[in-house]
Image: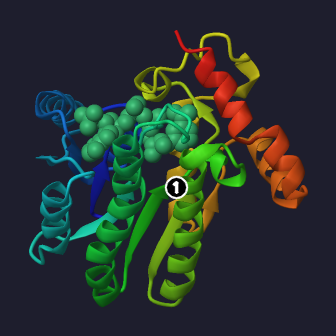
Amino acid sequence: MGTALVTGATSGIGLELAWQLAAARHHLVLVARDAARLDDVARQVRAAAGVDVEVLPADVGDPAGRAAVADRLRQPTRPVGLLVNNAGFSPGQLFVGGDLAVEENALEVMVRAVLELSHAAAPAMVRRGRGAILNVSSMSAFTAMGTYAAAKSWVLVFTEALAAELAGTGVTATALCPGLVRTEFHRRAGLDASTWPAVGWTDVEQVAAEALAGVRRGRVVVIPSARYRAAALVLRHAPRPLVRSLLGPRTSGRALRRRR
Ligand SMILES: NC(=O)c1ccc[n+]([C@@H]2O[C@H](COP(=O)([O-])OP(=O)(O)OC[C@H]3O[C@@H](n4cnc5c(N)ncnc54)[C@H](OP(=O)(O)O)[C@@H]3O)[C@@H](O)[C@H]2O)c1
């Protein structure tokens, strides 16, 4: 895979993916908004793994930030073999009466950035006859839990379509659908996850390892952990009215009302 570019690489799933990619001897381009935190991560990864690490501070929710990342992906002299579209967040609000700017930003970060960066990366990969795109979706993609679920459903179907279009080119596209993972995600959304049952959580190391194994095998959809694979099977075959009533906006609404 050569060099991997990871968005949202300073925390949680993106940070763990960066460490595992560095351990597998990939050079890295790390993207996030917090430049000081990016520098810290880069210094640690360089020292521990001895790989090249570039930092690219950028807000992928902003057109200028996305353009900077897209320019880096198109650079012919420093090819990127793996693009990881991981940056994301939960709007942490119900849609009705919520802040529209937050909803728009969620679409920019989790949909538009995935679209534009995949569009920037794929042509050069196809010309080289190798490469991979890993888009971080979510188990929410199989539910109806608010606009976050809608955005992650888009990521899942977009990636399936991209994988089909890329078939036979040597380039692959993979959607990662994690369940609950302990990262900064829930705190940033103002959600109190402390009382959620232990059985629901997946280790971030396992999520990243299964994601990268899936990319190496050219898998189109990766759902880390057997119990979430079983849940996805049920959700994919369950009647949608049942899914909406069990895992719809009312469920996310209850979580939001339990905020700290
Ligand atoms: N944790 C879960 O339970 C879970 C489950 C399923 C799917 N996911 C998905 O997994 C992905 C990673 O989430 P996580 O749990 O690892 O969350 P996290 O710990 O909050 O990390 C989010 C990362 O994204 C970066 N980021 C956020 N907004 C950005 C922006 N506008 N531009 C550039 N970078 C941005 C953050 O850095 P800066 O703040 O410095 O920009 C940080 O590095 C997301 O797409 C999320 O939807 C998470």
Residue wearing tag 1 = 151
**Residue nearer the viewer, 202 or 249:** 249
* Residue 185 makes an appearance in the image: yes
Q: Is residue 253 above or below residue 131?
A: above
Q: Which corner quadrant of the figure contains ligand 1?
A: top left
Q: Amino acid at mark 1?
A: Ala
**Residue shown at 34%/44% (left/top)?**
101
Asked if one can make out residue 213 in the rendered structure from this viewpoint, the answer is no
Q: Quadrant of residue 102?
A: top left
Coordinates of residue 11 in the picture (x, y in percent)? 35, 31
At a point 29% along the width and 89% down the height, the residue shown is 127
Is the CB atom of the residue marked by disc 1 within 8 angstroms of ligand 1's nearest atom? no
Which element is circle 1 on? helix
**Left or right: 245, with 175 as reference point:** right
State whether residue 88 is above or below residue 27: above
Q: Residues within 10 Å of mark 1 (few under 14, many from 20)?
A: many
Q: Residue at x 15, y 64 (%)?
A: 67
Residues 92 and 43: in front is 92
Q: Is residue 195 above or below residue 163?
A: above
Q: Position of residue 97 (x, y in %)?
A: 50, 36
